[in-house]
Image: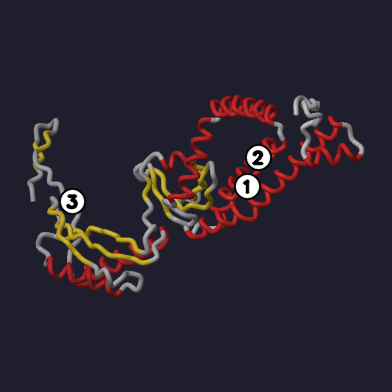
């Protein structure tokens, strides 16, 4: 095959295949038969590769994604990429099988030049796309998770994950559209990735108060709260000796954590401990500053405030 014409061989054959020879014997000229044979080969190869990909490869990819427990929203973009890959492979094989090699090489050169130009113009988009693929495969977070990034500067609940951006709803009800690369290039915190979350809170008591009594109250109120886990059990450690108080750090665990559960549980727990401290006469002191010195008036009198 050469430019749509057929050159007879030395033995008189035109070099046509079985399909071309059958078409030539029917009603077509050798050149027409050659073109028709190429077109038929192209369609048959394209259909065969496409069907094999859709009926075999795509289901295999879907089962592999199911084994990784990706939800349907996360699977759809990856399956779309797979279908594009099958279509590209089918076209490449069909061009080769039909004998359109020169045309395929020309198209490949044009496609490569176009891809280079597009790649240079869309570096950020491609970077976010690749980051989105990593988010889908590595699963650092899922829809509904509470995440924090940039050292806690931003935080919120994930509402949507696409291949370019992730949408996060902040706790002030603001919607953030975050490029995926911003979530993969730095440290990202996912407090609710596990099935439980540890909370810490420091209660300050006076130096004259009973540390053991305060510790018992803190632990007792944790055990009474229905949303605080018994295993791991609540614990209290003396962590600070401040200027005006003794710091007792309480460590508690909640199951199936979310931002709303975290805020509500901590608020209820701290309120209950504060109420018990008031009942038992345990003081929660605040810093006190004493000023010493005198104040000279224009009349020459001096007002001195003695220190207490």
Q: Tag 2, which secondary structure?
A: helix
Residue under the point 47% across and 54% down: 142
- Cα separation, mark 1 vs mark 3, equals 67 Å
Mark seen at residue 113: none
Mark 1: which secondary structure?
Answer: helix
Q: Earlier in the sequence, mark 1 or mark 3?
A: 1
* Residue 183 at x, y percent in the picture: 43, 43
Location of mark 1 (residue): 83
Near mark 3 (Cα within 10 A), the count class, few <14, some 14-19 or many ≥20, is few
Task: Where is residue 17? Give x, y as percent.
Answer: 77, 38
| Residue closer to the observer: 287 or 142 | 142
Alpha-carbon neighbours of circle 1 within 10 Å: few (<14), some, or many (≥20)? some
The image shows residue 64 at horizontal and vertical percentages of: 51, 56
Closest to the observer: 263 or 10? Answer: 10
Q: Quadrant of the N terminus?
A: top right
**In the image, 85: left or right of 301?**
right
Cα–Cα span, label 3 and label 2: 79 Å
Between disc 1 and disc 3, the foreground one is 1
Instruction: Indicate left or right for 108 with 302 as reference.
Output: right
Mark 1 or mark 2: name the one nearer the start of the chain: 1
Q: Nearer the viewer, residue 95 or 116?
A: 95
Mark 3 / mark 2, whichever is N-terminal:
2
Q: Quadrant of residue 302?
A: top left
Q: Residues within 10 Å of mark 2 (few under 14, many from 20)?
A: some
Q: Nearer the viewer, mark 3 or mark 2?
A: 2
Please say if 4 is above or below 205: above
Q: Identify the residue under disc 3.
A: 287
> Which of label 1 and label 2 is nearer to you?
2
The residue to which callout 2 is attached is 93
- Residue 29, percent from left and from top: 88, 32
Residue at (19%, 64%) from the top-left corner?
236
């Amino acid at each position: 095959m050469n430019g749509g014409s057929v050159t007879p061989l030395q033995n008189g054959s035109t070099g046509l295949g079985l399909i071309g020879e059958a078409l030539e014997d029917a009603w077509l000229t050798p050149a027409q038969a050659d073109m028709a044979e190429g077109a038929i080969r192209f369609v048959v190869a394209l259909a065969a590769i496409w069907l094999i990909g859709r009926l075999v490869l795509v289901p295999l990819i879907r089962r592999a994604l199911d084994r990784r427990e990706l939800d349907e929203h996360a699977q759809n973009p990856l399956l779309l990429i797979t279908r594009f890959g099958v279509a590209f492979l089918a076209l490449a094989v069909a061009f080769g099988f039909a004998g359109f090699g020169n045309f395929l090489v020309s198209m490949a050169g044009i496609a490569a030049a176009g891809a280079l130009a597009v790649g240079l113009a869309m570096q950020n988009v491609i970077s976010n796309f690749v980051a989105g693929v990593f988010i889908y495969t590595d699963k650092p977070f899922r829809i509904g998770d509470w995440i924090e990034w940039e050292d806690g500067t931003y935080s919120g609940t994930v509402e949507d994950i696409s291949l370019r951006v992730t949408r996060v709803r902040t706790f002030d009800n603001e919607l953030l559209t975050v490029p995926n690369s911003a979530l993969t290039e730095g440290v990202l915190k996912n407090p609710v990735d596990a099935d439980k979350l540890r909370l810490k809170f420091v209660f300050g008591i006076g130096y004259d108060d009973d540390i053991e009594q305060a510790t018992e109250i803190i632990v007792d109120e944790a055990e009474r709260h229905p949303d605080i886990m018994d295993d791991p059990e609540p614990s209290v450690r003396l962590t600070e000796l401040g200027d005006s108080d003794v710091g007792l750090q309480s460590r508690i665990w909640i199951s199936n954590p979310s931002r709303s559960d975290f805020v509500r549980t901590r608020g209820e727990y701290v309120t209950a401990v504060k109420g018990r401290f008031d009942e038992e006469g345990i003081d929660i002191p605040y810093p006190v500053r004493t000023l010493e010195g005198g104040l000279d008036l224009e009349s020459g009198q001096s007002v001195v405030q003695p220190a207490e």
